[in-house]
Image: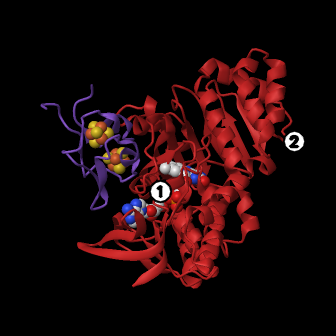
Chain colours: A red, B purple
Amino acid sequence: MKYDVVVVGAGPAGCVTARFAAENGAKVLIIERRSEVGVPVLCGEGISRKIDEWDMLEGDRWIAGRMDGARIYSPDGTMVKLSADLAGNETGYVVYRDIFDQELARRAVKAGVKIMMNTMAIGLLKDNDKITGVKAKQFDEEVDIEADLVVGTDGVESKIGQWAGIETRLNPKDLETCAQYTLTNVECTDAYCDFYLGREIAPGGYIWVFPKGKDTANVGIGILASLSESGMAKQLLDRFIANDPRFKNSEPIRFLAGAAPVANPVETVRDNLILVGDAARHVDAITGGGLTCCLEGGKIAGETIGKAVEEQDFSKEMLSAYETGWKEAFGKKLKRNYLVKEIMLDFDDKTLNMLADSLKDYKFEGISTLRLIKALVLKHPTLLMKLRHLMKVSKEAKE
Amino acid sequence: MGKPKAKVDREKCLACGGCISVCPQDALSWYGSKALVDDEKCISCAICIRICPVGAISGEVY
Ligand SMILES: Cc1cc2nc3c(=O)[nH]c(=O)nc-3n(C[C@H](O)[C@H](O)[C@H](O)COP(=O)(O)OP(=O)(O)OC[C@H]3O[C@@H](n4cnc5c(N)ncnc54)[C@H](O)[C@@H]3O)c2cc1C
Ligand code: SF4
Ligand code: SF4
């Protein structure tokens, strides 16, 4: 059977792209190597309130908690508090990712999308150099799936791009390697997402505590892969949990390992090919969060695909409306936050403490990165050298 | 030659995909829901060993 579009990977990027493509007239198949959509969960499960405006999820079964704000702790424990309005941009809800993903899949199926589970892409079908579909394996059987367009939404481990000649391999300095416990019987009394920074705590990354309902929380760590040693993420997380009184009587009900790309986005369209989500490296390099880009980018991709099907034109030129679209929507933010990540890597614990100390009383009203940087530079003129480049980009970027 | 290749402990691997995303030789891929090293391709660079968050990959670290 031939489809207009085959989508590889039933994560948020795949389900949203598929849904909007189908709603715009495309015949779409998703293939997914796992045996249950959204399972196992590999995520901290924090997401922006922005999703309210997008109408992609119905009901509230996917919501574990609504957050009142976020707190960032520097290595010496100095706390910077962000109110809901501001923090909501990054951490508005804590969700159940399995239900979240399945809800996105349900909306896709409702739009007419077909899903094949236990089916792993193992290569691209090509006619000379033209991509004509996906070679896949369902259980032990090889199947050829023909399609005019292949969508790579195969996550951090993506191979679709590489098979099409796009370099998606990550340099270890562009990967956060992660571990997370979901702990129950914790003593987290308020609805705040907490972030802990510091070289000793989490080199090149941070530890997070995201409350999930009443007495359960996701407690996780991401460290920069280039600073990692074998098993280090788990060891540092175990140490943090052992030393925090809130977790004294807690027990884990889930443990996961994870990997989050913190790279610059790659080229996302070729003839007969589109990349979306983690596969496109559409992740905020400061937080490692990628869900909003999956939803926002997936919608743009799906709409572009609808047009391509209508005109029966799957050329790179036709598909580049998607690339222009995501660049407009969040491209500058990704670029700027990648630069911030690079700059923050140079900060030792002393600098982080000093920054937190300057910011702890800062009135975060209508905060923009540019204003924040200006406020910092006024207090610490020597920072100017490091931040100069960033100010330029920040001026260009839409807040 | 003679250098130990990376090896994934299938009991420990939690399938995060990190090693697959960084291997410079494309020597890692999924096999039955866990990461697997292709010995033919592995050049014993040990990158995957260092980045595994749960220490599921061994070999010699240079
Ligand atoms: C520990 C951790 C914590 C995180 N916390 C947050 C957070 O709090 N907030 C946030 O916004 N983001 C967070 N992220 C990032 C977020 O999880 C990702 O950005 C998001 O899952 C990307 O969605 P996706 O659809 O692109 O890919 P995925 O969700 O990874 O989906 C890819 C799918 O493709 C399938 N697949 C892969 N290869 C193949 C193949 N060859 N054939 C068929 N199927 C295949 C996979 O099985 C998977 O189902 C976190 C990441 C990690 C690792
Ligand atoms: S990095 Fe470790 S846990 Fe993750 S897939 Fe590779 S071997 Fe498995
Ligand atoms: S040792 Fe290097 S080449 Fe071998 S599998 Fe690991 S990352 Fe790939």
Label 1 vs label 2: CA separation? 35 Å
Q: Earlier in the sequence, mark 1 or mark 2?
A: 1
User: Who's the residue at 63% across and 24% down the image?
Assistant: A76
State the quadrant of the N terminus of chain A: bottom left
Vertical placement of A148 versus B24: above or below? below
In the picture, measured across the screen, residue A194 lies left or right of residue A185, that is: right
Judged by depth in the image, the label closer to the viewer, 1 or 2, is 1
Q: Secondary structure at mark 2?
A: loop
Q: Chain of mark 1?
A: A
User: Who's the residue at 40% across and 34% down the image?
Assistant: A232
Amino acid beneath label 2: Glu
Is the CB of mark 2 within 8 Å of ligand 1? no
Which residue is at the front of the view, A321 or A205?
Answer: A321
In the picture, measured across the screen, residue A23 lies left or right of residue B37, that is: right
Vertical placement of A2 versus A149: above or below? below
Residue A13: quarter of image: bottom right
For ligand 3, the image quadrant comes to top left
Q: Which residue is mark 1?
A: A155
Where residue B44 appears, x then y in whole percent? 24, 34
Amino acid beneath label 1: Gly
Q: Which residue is mark 2?
A: A365
Q: Does the rendering let one see residue A208?
A: yes
Which residue is at the front of the view, A325 or A260?
Answer: A325
Residue A106: quarter of image: bottom right
Where residue A108 appears, x then y in whole percent? 57, 77
User: Who's the residue at 45% across and 29% down the image?
Assistant: A227
Q: Secondary structure at mark 1?
A: loop
Which of the labelled discs sits on residue A68, or is there none?
Answer: none
Q: Does the rendering let one see residue A191?
A: no
